[in-house]
Image: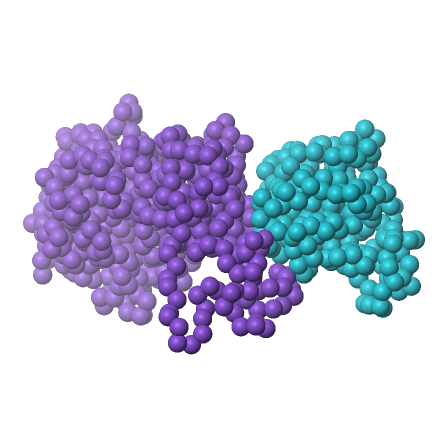
Chain colours: A purple, B cyan
Amino acid sequence: MRFPRRAAGALLAPAVAVSLLALPVSALDGDPGLHDPSTVIEAGGKFYVYATGRGLPVSMSDDGWTWRRAGSVMDAVPGGRPGPEVVARGGDATWAPDIVHVGDKYFLYYAAPGRQPKAAIGLLVGRTLDPASPDYHWTDAGPVVWSDGIEDSNAIDPGVFHDPTDGSLWLTYGSYFGYIRLVELDPSTGLRRYPDRAPVDIAINSEASDLTFHDGWYYLFVTHGSCCAGANSSYNIRMGRARRVTGPYLDNMGVDMLQGGGKLFAGSRGRSVGPGHFGRLVLGDDVEKFSCHYEADLDRGGRSVLDIRPLLWRDGWPVAGDNVTAGTYEIESARTGTALEMAVQGVPVGGPRGRGAAGRGGRGRGAGAPAGRGRGFGPGGPGRGFGGPGARGRGATPPAPIPAQQASDVDAAWPAGPAGVRLAPYMLQAQQKWTIAPVAGAGGYPGSPYFRIGLAGTERVLAATADGELTVAPAFTSAPEQLWRIDQLTDGTYRLMPKAVPGTSAPMALSAIGSSTPTLETFRAGSDRGRWLLRTP
Amino acid sequence: MTIVRSTCVFAAALAVASLAGVGLSARPAAPAQEPPRTLAVPHGDALPVDSQGFLRRWLVLEPIPVPGALTEDAVHEVLAANDVWAHASAPPADGQTAMAAGQSYAWHAVDTLAYNLNLFHFAHALGKPTSNVLFWATTIVNAPRAMTDVRLAIGSNAASAWWLNGRHVIALYNDRQAVIDDGVSPRVTLRAGANVIRAAIVNAGGATDFCARFLDAQDEPITTLTASLAPAEGVSR
């Protein structure tokens, strides 16, 4: 049995240099250092998150990518500390808050541990999240739940859940000592709706619980493992689901989370160790994100940092997606299966060959094909073959590999100025390969910076035009129409949107409106036309 | 019903190898073959698009022999060398001829019974080549009102280039099948009344056809249009 020692302000990281953008994007920009984050919440066009630490540190962001510290919650609470009833039930530390917006109120729940497992969860009520607003202040509403130090509960790590099916409000809490517990709240006050009823036990051996609902299922997220040991932390996020909010929550193998079950949602990977404290952020149009902290970001000296990543849904279970990383990709339409390309005449990889090379784009009977093979008369016409220049008889030297086609191999005939954009079957050709790279200092959106989408091996970039179409511009200027937001959607495909389209403020997304034709138009969540696959070329 | 009757007339005409009365003239004597079932003789002034918005009434020029290369550059060369519009003094009409590379070719009015116009059937019925050829086609699209932010959506076997009211709006190159909405133009405006489409389809070998329709700003097919052959007064082709 153990009680976590929570990181406080000392763990908060200084601003992170934007040079990190040269690396694959793994976490946020600015100052994302924190521990035990609340669910990220959007209000008034800004994003807020609250964390463990003295006075409950506030972090905010204008775009969800670049974060900054914005004081502490307790700065706006009379007395500057948990109220006396909260301290009496628990202690005066301030940990692991969570927040929800109900009606015109924000309810902020926080852990106030004393000598664990004696602890309490307090409630603060506010009307705005903007620290600059004259209406910004938090009112102490007292303790909501608590543990007396003996019972099978450690009343920390609140997770608040607003049930979309009936508007009811629920609070989960707990940490290792005993159970993860659930109580119903009064949506008008944020306090317990039935204070005389016993809490419902829904999980054990975990902490940082949070509930969400999707497509007829309630999902309980918890964090397993140990925290607060840097890269030696074994934190990982697990989950179960139930048809009723009160459970039972079973994992993918049918094991009740009350018996230690839990399907892995997110574990350590790459340069990030120990994800914990799940929170869901629904942005609409099939774009969902989840927030968490990593116990150790190896690219930031092992500090604990916030991250925001795509949330996917597959076979009835949430899946932790990944923000786009720098690299070269084929951009394939989920609607048509054709690939985005600069509109120039392609050259077959390895060069034209075969009898049909001159006029048929390289198709035709290969020089090495046996007589009589490859003939036909269909839509594609006669002269197709199976051989190529390397197809030879038995005993000959094995054919040499054909190198990948580079832009410099074929760009002599490309226009020097702007070029069109179209879709075509992917043929591994240079005009079909796009290098996606984050752009420093250009802002971003929840979880990612804006990206440049360049034709691989060239200075040419994909851009929006004033008439809502696409072009390949000869050079990158960092203009908004050349910056791209790339969100992974809930089905794992991607939505690509220019930061701005000249002449309009309407958000527009890359869309396949024909097998050969892309355009920019309003994204439609119910259609594949705006969904794209990023494939390794 | 009209279409069914037309089909019967068209088929009967083919059976007796006499197409002069139904618009497809100059068919040489040929062994009896299964007549094409996808084309019919136009009747009436205008033919509504079908339920999916496909234009079904066209004037098609007899195929012009060309090298059959389908790259972008090759298609441009073919069109420049066989520009039947450059010296045309009047809009084409059924039975009239046009000159290309010193040769005369006849225009034929056809309705297609399918969403696409089967150029293989068209040329085959005329005893003309179907491979390594260029087809010119044109129609007049009648719009009940001006329509902005619409798109011409086409598919073709094989390469094709398309103009709307004299403006080049979309092209497809290389060997390909006719796929609905394969190529889609940028947003264009259909003016109230007559709008002229011109198309060039270059085939290398085998089957050849095309389809065309307009999509509205929501990418839904526009089904309130008609297609006709005679140019409306004041419309320049």
**Residue found at x 82% / y 57%:** B126
Q: In which quadrant is the N terminus of chain A drawn?
A: bottom left
The image quarter containing residue B30 is: bottom right
- The reply to whether residue A505 is in sight is yes
Furthest-top residue in view?
A134
**Residue found at x 26% / y 63%:** A262
State left or right for residue B59 relative to residue A22. Answer: right
Furthest-bottom residue in view?
A394
**Residue found at x 41% / y 47%:** A409
Q: Residue B28, percent across and down?
A: 86, 59
Q: In which quadrant is the C terminus of chain A drawn?
A: bottom left
- The reply to whether residue A168 is in sight is no
Which residue is more in the foreground, A116 or A444? A444
Q: Is residue A69 above or below residue A163?
A: above
The image quarter containing residue A66 is: top left
Q: Residue A177, percent across and down?
A: 14, 59
The image quarter containing residue A8 is: top left
Q: Residue A158, percent across and down?
A: 23, 48
Which residue is more in the foreground, A517 or A295? A517
Which residue is more in the foreground, A153 or A379? A379
Number of numbered discs on residues? 0
Which residue is more in the foreground, A532 or A406? A406
**Residue found at x 22% / y 37%:** A19
State left or right for residue A498 relative to residue A170. Answer: right
State left or right for residue A239 relative to residue A336. Answer: left
Q: Is residue A11 above or below residue A352?
A: above
Q: Residue B144, percent across and down?
A: 76, 36
Furthest-left residue in view?
A115
